[in-house]
Image (cartoon, rainbow, N blue to C red):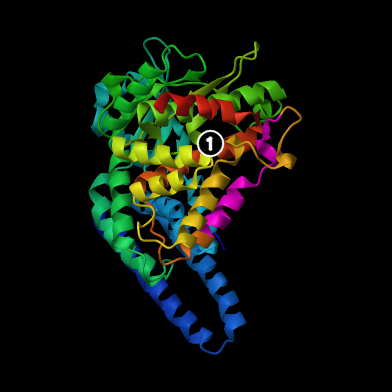
């Protein structure tokens, strides 16, 4: 029986406890793999394929359940594997690992309160009245609402789980072996290289000083743009493992209040979400790459000028000019129906090999043209309004794109994408999902054309 992932956890921070738990996971994964191999020996081809699909799902469920218990970097690795793994892991495993994105139980307040005393000091902490019930819980930390006693200012206190940063390296090394034992990654994939990229990303996300800087930078860049809200950082309460910001009210994207907005207001929110992403990437050269809906709120306004509240800047990534230029070639090539330019950009960022055969190039062009569909001149008529706006809520574009990527990834010429692509597309996919949830109707081509023209 699956455990209740919302029940508060006693956090395993000691190296002995964590190593024991990880060793147990490895032993069970290896034993299950051995038993599956023996049973498959007596099955026909069709039976083996069905058995493999069920085995991958069970192994992933076991892994997700155990990672959810440990939290910290090992759970974050599971989340990142669901992002990277789209390019090489069985779909059954991806479906399960994606549950780690938004199904994280909180850590008991009795574990975190003494940690907060040590990090801020009793005098500073006494200035705040903190609600022991978390607003949100994630793999690396959780957020509590607070009130500053002096003036009643409402705050959010983000607390990193104790002992987390010190365990990242050893956790990832051990988990790499477990994933191999569970046979969730096919032979030939350089899992160590993937895990190295994941490790760097996790180190970035546990650097709360970096997150504070990025929050301030976004606040400065968007200070005069009334479409967005960015929290204020309170340096006097913040450390390298505690981040205190202003509490910014807003509705969840899936809330009834947002879903029942008039079409015009949902369209405006969708355009603003797209414009933010395009501005980040094409103008700033940096992107907040975590599209989790917990990182966004919608602040409703009676006048209809609703605003997007932006939260959590720990996953902001900066992109090198060489990458930006090559990716610009990919987008521009797809936008202008120039396959040669699209392929040139893909080779430039290391996604395709220069000596790939034509059919590999053709498969990549198919993916590129699919992703540009909402911004093209020849989107399917069934997905367009009478005025030519793309109806995001009726589109199955993510599924079609995923299928095309899976077909392309079968080829031995296909490379696991560089981390820049993985995390950029993670955010892009999140924007697409947001527009679908808002059921926005948007004429995206003029919007994208405007940004592309600034770089031409």
Please state the horizontal and vertical placement of residue 151, each as a whole percent of the image.
39, 9
* Circle 1 residues within 10 Å: few <14, some 14–19, many ≥20: many
Q: Is residue 62 visible?
A: yes
Please state the horizontal and vertical placement of residue 261, each as a whole percent of the image.
69, 24
Q: Split into 4 quadrants, where in the image is the C terminus?
A: top left
Please state the horizontal and vertical placement of residue 355, each as a whole percent of the image.
36, 61
Q: Is residue 320 visible?
A: no
Q: Split into 4 quadrants, where in the image is the N terminus?
A: bottom right
- In the rendered image, residue 399 lying in the magenta stretch gets the answer yes
Residue nearest the observer in this picture, 423 or 364: 364
Q: Residue at x 59, y 30 (%)?
A: 444
Residue nearest the observer in this picture, 219 or 158: 219
Q: Residue at x 34, y 62 (%)?
A: 21
Q: Residue at x 71, y 25 (%)?
A: 263
- In the rendered image, residue 429 lying in the magenta stretch gets the answer no
**Residue under pointer 1:** 431
Q: How many marks?
A: 1
Farthest bottom residue? 42
Please tell me in which quadrant of the rendered image residue 432 appears: top right
Asked whether, in this view, residue 247 is left or right of residue 178, the answer is right
> Against 417, is 383 above or below?
above
Chief SS of the magenta region: helix
Residue nearest the observer in this picture, 434 or 389: 389
First to last magenta residue range: 388-406
| Circle 1 SS class | helix
> Against 374, is 148 above or below?
above
Please tell me in which quadrant of the rendered image residue 413 appears: bottom left
> Against 307, is 328 above or below?
below
Q: Residue at x 52, y 37 (%)?
A: 336
């Amino acid at each position: 029986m699956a455990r209740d992932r919302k029940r508060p956890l006693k956090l395993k921070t000691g190296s002995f406890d964590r190593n024991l738990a990880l060793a147990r996971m490895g032993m069970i994964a290896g034993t299950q793999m051995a038993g599956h191999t023996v049973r498959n020996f007596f099955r026909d081809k069709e039976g083996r394929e069905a058995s493999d699909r069920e085995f991958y799902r069970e192994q992933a469920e076991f892994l997700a359940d155990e990672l959810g218990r440990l939290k910290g970097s090992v759970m974050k690795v599971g989340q990142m594997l669901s992002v990277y793994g789209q390019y090489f892991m069985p779909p059954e495993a991806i479906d399960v690992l994606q549950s780690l994105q938004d199904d994280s139980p909180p850590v008991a307040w009795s574990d975190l309160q003494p940690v907060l005393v040590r990090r801020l000091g009793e005098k500073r902490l006494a200035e705040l009245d903190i609600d022991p019930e978390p607003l949100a819980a994630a793999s690396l930390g959780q957020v509590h609402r607070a009130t500053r006693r002096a003036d009643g200012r409402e705050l959010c206190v983000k607390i990193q789980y104790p002992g987390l940063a010190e365990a990242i390296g050893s956790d990832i090394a051990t988990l790499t072996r477990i994933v191999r034992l569970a046979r969730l990654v096919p032979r030939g994939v350089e899992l160590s290289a993937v895990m190295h990229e994941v490790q760097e990303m996790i180190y970035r996300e546990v650097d709360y000083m970096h997150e504070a800087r990025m929050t301030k930078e976004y606040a400065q860049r968007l200070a005069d743009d009334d479409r967005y809200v960015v929290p204020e950082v309170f340096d006097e309460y913040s450390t390298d493992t505690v981040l205190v910001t202003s509490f910014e009210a807003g509705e969840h994207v899936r809330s009834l209040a947002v879903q029942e907005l008039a079409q015009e207001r949902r369209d405006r929110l969708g355009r603003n979400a797209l414009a933010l992403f395009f501005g980040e990437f094409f103008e700033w050269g940096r992107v907040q790459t975590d599209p989790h809906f917990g990182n966004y709120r919608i602040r409703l306004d009676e006048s209809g000028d609703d605003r997007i509240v932006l939260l959590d800047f720990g996953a902001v990534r900066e992109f090198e000019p060489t990458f930006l230029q090559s990716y610009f070639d990919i987008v521009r090539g797809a936008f202008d129906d120039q396959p040669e330019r699209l392929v040139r950009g893909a080779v430039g960022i290391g996604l395709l090999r220069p000596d790939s055969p034509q059919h590999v190039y053709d498969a990549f062009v198919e993916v590129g043209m699919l992703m540009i569909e909402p911004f093209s001149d020849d989107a399917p008529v069934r997905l367009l309004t009478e005025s030519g706006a793309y109806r995001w809520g009726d589109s199955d574009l993510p599924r079609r794109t995923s299928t095309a990527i899976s077909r392309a990834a079968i080829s031995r010429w296909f490379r696991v994408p560089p981390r820049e692509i993985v995390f950029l597309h993670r955010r892009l996919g999140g924007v697409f999902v947001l527009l679908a949830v808002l059921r926005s109707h948007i004429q995206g081509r003029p919007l994208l054309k405007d940004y592309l023209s600034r770089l031409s």
